[in-house]
Amino acid sequence: MGIFKKFFTNCAHPKGKMGRIMLTMMNLSHAPITNWGLKLINFQDRWTMLDIGCGGGATIKRLLKHSKDSQVYGIDISQESVAKSKNNCIDMLDKQVFVNQGSAEMLPYETGKFDLVTAVETIYFWPNLQSCFKEVYRVLKTGGRFAIIVEAADQDSMWTNIVEGMTTYSSDQILTMLRNAGFIQTETHQKKPMYNFITGVKA
């Protein structure tokens, strides 16, 4: 594997020095699309929220700012990401912020816990996406929202040839899987050139 592809493989599972560099880059590069997407959510105070694939923890901090007196949980498969997120939120850790290592396919949370679940630039790497969506549905409260924010919403994205283990999905495919998982009020918003916000509500 060339050094270029090896570096970008850290998008899926950041490890070591390259992984730490990638996490810092992602915190910066994902800021514009994340800020845009979160503006489409009607936040309420005192929400309990979960960010899946929390990476470097930047989205966790943004969620806290949108919902006063809230609690935000973060989960990531990468130990490096968990450490970075904890360090990034050190002042609020174990008070308003709780970060765990784990997979979207088996979330370590009770049924009906969250008002909002977010997934920013991460579903490309989730195993068995349909099963993951059902697991998200499980941990949401009735009426809770799942918000997916992605740039690559094209099955033929060039990034799949660069990042090992990456799979991209069209907006229509994602909407279909959300509906199959039980979500209602599914909708998508797009901002050129590549921003996509796809959401559904637990019935």
Image: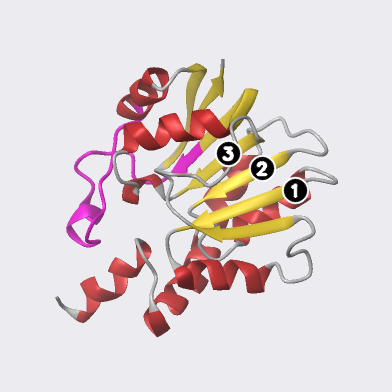
The residue sitting at 43% across, 72% down in the picture is: 22
**Residue sticking out furthest to the bottom:** 17
Q: Residues within 10 Å of mark 1 (few under 14, many from 20)?
A: many
The percent coordinates of residue 32 (x first, y second) are 56, 53
The percent coordinates of residue 115 (x first, y second) are 67, 33
Q: Secondary structure at mark 1?
A: strand
The residue sitting at 39% across, 70% down in the picture is: 14
Q: CA distance from mark 1 to mark 3?
A: 12 Å
Q: Amino acid at mark 2?
A: Met
The residue sitting at 35% across, 47% down in the picture is: 126
Q: Are marks 2 and 3 in contact (CB under 8 Å)?
A: yes
Q: Taking the image as drawn, is residue 41 in sight?
A: yes
Q: Which residues are magenta?
A: 148-171
Magenta part mainly helix, strand or loop?
loop
Q: Nearer the viewer, residue 151 or 61?
A: 61
Q: Are marks 1 and 3 in contact (CB under 8 Å)?
A: no
Q: Quadrant of the C terminus?
A: top right
Q: Taking the image as drawn, is residue 193 in sight?
A: no
- Find disc 1 in the rendering and name its residue: 71
Q: Are marks 2 and 1 in contact (CB under 8 Å)?
A: yes
- Find disc 2 in the rendering and name its residue: 49
Question: Between disc 2 and disc 3, whose residue precedes?
Answer: 2
